[in-house]
Amino acid sequence: DQQVKQNSPSLSVQEGRISILNCDYTNSMFDYFLWYKKYPAEGPTFLISISSIKDKNEDGRFTVFLNKSAKHLSLHIVPSQPGDSAVYFCAASGNSGYALNFGKGTSLLVTP
Amino acid sequence: KAGVTQTPRYLIKTRGQQVTLSCSPISGHRSVSWYQQTPGQGLQFLFEYFSETQRNKGNFPGRFSGRQFSNSRSEMNVSTLELGDSALYLCASRIRGLGTGELFFGEGSRLTVL
């Protein structure tokens, strides 16, 4: 049962434009959300996170928005750069804090 | 400081064999968790260890097991390998066993079962 869903397997964006990656979750007990980026042949690396007490968190070119009522979060990358081309995973954790529930990932391609 | 180290990076096994994967967490990190990544399922949680105790286990059969040593290093074992066990196995560490600490991942062990 996939509790974190990334419904777009892939996304292509031109360099300099905005990339918007979406994520939906079903478990209302999730209270912490993270985005990880993964290049081929490497492990995922942490990008940005947001707690359920906030609706926005910003770090440089990356901003994560959380809409708790819709159980939806999104990652905005502005401006997009070719080096951002990677697979992006959305993840969520709940009260137990032990495990991260990951989505299946969205492959982002930023073209020059 | 050194990151999460996983060995071996690549291995090939045949059905019915067993395999042991090793993970050395970042120094000072006491929590180690394991994830399986496959193209169709994304990253799926296997189990997490904190202070040598398994704190949580994902929805995997008993053929998948693990342990953590007193120095926080961890191993996972898969017995009676099946073709479907072919995957990238990722180890991740964090400082605490609870809460919202960020996970730091290793590069993974790529297992191919023939």
Image (cartoon, coloured by chain):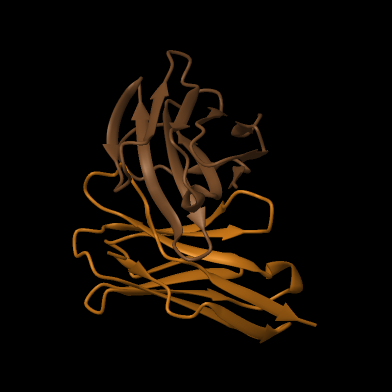
Q: Quadrant of the N terminus of chain A?
A: bottom left
In the figure, what tint was chain B given? brown
Chain shown in orange: A
Residue at (48% x, 80% y) in the render: A8
Residue at (51% x, 33% y) in the render: B17
Q: Is residue A72 above or below residue B63?
A: below
Q: Quadrant of residue A23?
A: bottom left
The image position of residue A66, as x and y in percent, is 35, 72
Q: Quadrant of the C terminus of chain A?
A: bottom right
The reply to whether residue A31 is in sight is yes
The image position of residue A20, as x and y in percent, is 52, 80
Residue at (55% x, 23% y) in the render: B27
A71 vs B108, nearest the viewer:
B108
Q: Quadrant of residue A87?
A: bottom right
Q: Is residue B108 above or below residue B6?
A: below
Q: Quadrant of residue B22?
A: top right
Q: Is residue A9 above or below residue B81?
A: below
Residue sitting at the far right: A112
Q: Is residue B68 above or below residue A69?
A: above
The reply to whether residue B24 is in sight is no
